[in-house]
Image (tube, helix red, strand yellow):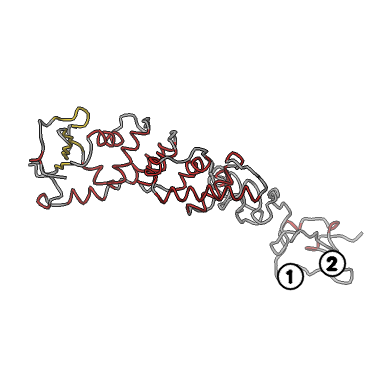
């Protein structure tokens, strides 16, 4: 950034981004932008510090406007592309070539616009990029090397050696690591008995394991399909969360506990859950059902008499008073039974 006195030529308002209601002026070359400082203050710590700095601290330009900045080390075309992400009139539709996204990600990385950088990475992953160009760009902008695995593998399996210009652009460290991976592949082929191995003899999975080891990339996680969640909240496979029935509630077991399996499988045995059964047996005099722990009720031994309701401390239900003694085990409840 520099003083506005260094500018040469007539200042022109940008045709798309000299916005009505803008509260921040940015001068790049002879193009003046008037935009909203809100987005820059919210998304970027770098710009937040610049906006909060006093006008005479050197962080701001020396123009009369209270929020004016002169960017001498930024191209007007790159800044225009960057603003397109913020002011895109087609919501959520970002159709642009590789060159545009590289311009955007360069400023997003420089000014610490994390969300815009993530957006640029997602869009770049949808496009076809030459392996060397992708490796150079992703290294420069400190992007996770996991995204570079296909590019690394393509460079390792390429029959044509690197040219001097390609090696200079990749850097010595990357060139040496690629050479290490290629040599490991040849050595493994020789040990397996292949006399004249070519890189077409290697599967991508084999090369990926070598590349991960050489470049220090974390081992491959489980299949994405085993971690992806569908719209109902159920994992497509065995994972680590409770199954839901489409309404956000866990399926109950017969004892009232919730299950923790997946797709109807028990988490401990991976077998289908039994159908939920509800007991319809009448309650006994002590309040429990006649079936307990899956065992059938048994009659008392002949030499023992069942306890009466007065002896066990519970009053008999009124409904039992009207029952016939044909189904009783021997007593005369309520005195209503008759001797035959």
The N terminus lies in which quarter of the figure? top left
Local SS, label 1: loop
In this view, the mark in front (2 or 1):
2
The reply to whether callout 2 and callout 1 are in contact (CB within 8 Å) is no
Q: How far across and how far down the image is residue 88, in percent?
A: 30, 32
Residue 18, above or below 197: above
In the picture provided, is 194 more to the left or to the right than 25? right
In the picture provided, is 95 more to the left or to the right than 280? left
Q: How far across and how far down the image is residue 165, in percent?
A: 38, 40
Q: How far across and how far down the image is residue 34, in percent?
A: 17, 35
Q: Residue at x 69, y 55 (%)?
A: 269
Which of 275 and 321 lies nearest the eye of the viewer? 275
- In which image quadrant can residue 31 be found? top left
- Which residue has dot 1 on it? 310
From this viewpoint, which residue is outermost toward the top? 15
- In which image quadrant can residue 99 be found? top left
- Which residue has dot 2 on it? 300
Label of residue 269 in the image: none
Which of 323 and 96 lies nearest the eye of the viewer? 96
Alpha carbon distance from label 2 to label 1: 18 Å
In the picture provided, is 192 more to the left or to the right than 302? left
Q: Residues within 10 Å of mark 2 (few under 14, many from 20)?
A: few
Q: Residue at x 42, y 40 (%)?
A: 163
């Amino acid at each position: 950034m520099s003083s506005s006195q260094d500018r040469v030529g007539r200042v022109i308002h940008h045709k798309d981004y000299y916005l009505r209601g803008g509260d921040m002026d940015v001068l790049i070359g002879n193009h003046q932008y008037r935009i909203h400082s809100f987005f820059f203050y919210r998304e970027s710590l770098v710009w937040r510090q610049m906006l909060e700095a006093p006008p005479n601290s050197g962080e701001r330009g020396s123009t009369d406007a209270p929020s004016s900045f002169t960017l001498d080390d930024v191209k007007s075309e790159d800044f225009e592309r960057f603003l397109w992400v913020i002011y895109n009139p087609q919501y959520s539709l970002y159709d642009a070539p590789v060159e545009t996204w590289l311009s955007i990600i360069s400023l997003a990385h420089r000014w610490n616009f994390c969300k815009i950088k993530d957006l640029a990475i997602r869009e770049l992953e949808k496009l076809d990029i030459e392996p060397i160009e992708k490796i150079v760009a992703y290294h420069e902008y400190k992007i996770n090397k996991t995204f570079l695995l296909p590019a690394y593998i393509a460079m390792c399996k390429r029959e044509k050696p690197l040219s001097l210009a390609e090696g200079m652009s990749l850097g010595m460290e990357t060139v040496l690591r690629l050479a290490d991976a290629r040599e490991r592949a040849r050595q493994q082929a020789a040990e397996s008995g292949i006399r004249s191995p070519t890189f077409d003899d290697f599967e991508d999975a084999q090369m990926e394991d070598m590349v991960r080891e050489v470049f220090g990339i974390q081992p491959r996680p489980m299949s994405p399909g085993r971690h992806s969640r569908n719209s109902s909240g159920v994992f497509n496979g065995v994972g680590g969360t409770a199954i839901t029935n489409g309404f956000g509630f866990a399926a109950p077991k017969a004892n009232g506990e919730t299950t923790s399996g997946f797709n109807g499988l028990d988490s401990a045995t991976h077998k289908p859950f039994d159908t939920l059964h509800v007991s319809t047996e009448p309650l006994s005099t002590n309040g429990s059902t006649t079936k307990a722990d899956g065992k059938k009720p048994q009659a008392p031994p002949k030499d023992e008499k069942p306890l009466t309701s007065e002896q066990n401390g519970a009053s008999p239900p009124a409904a039992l008073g009207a029952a016939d003694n044909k189904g009783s085990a021997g007593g005369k409840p309520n005195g209503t039974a008759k001797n035959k």
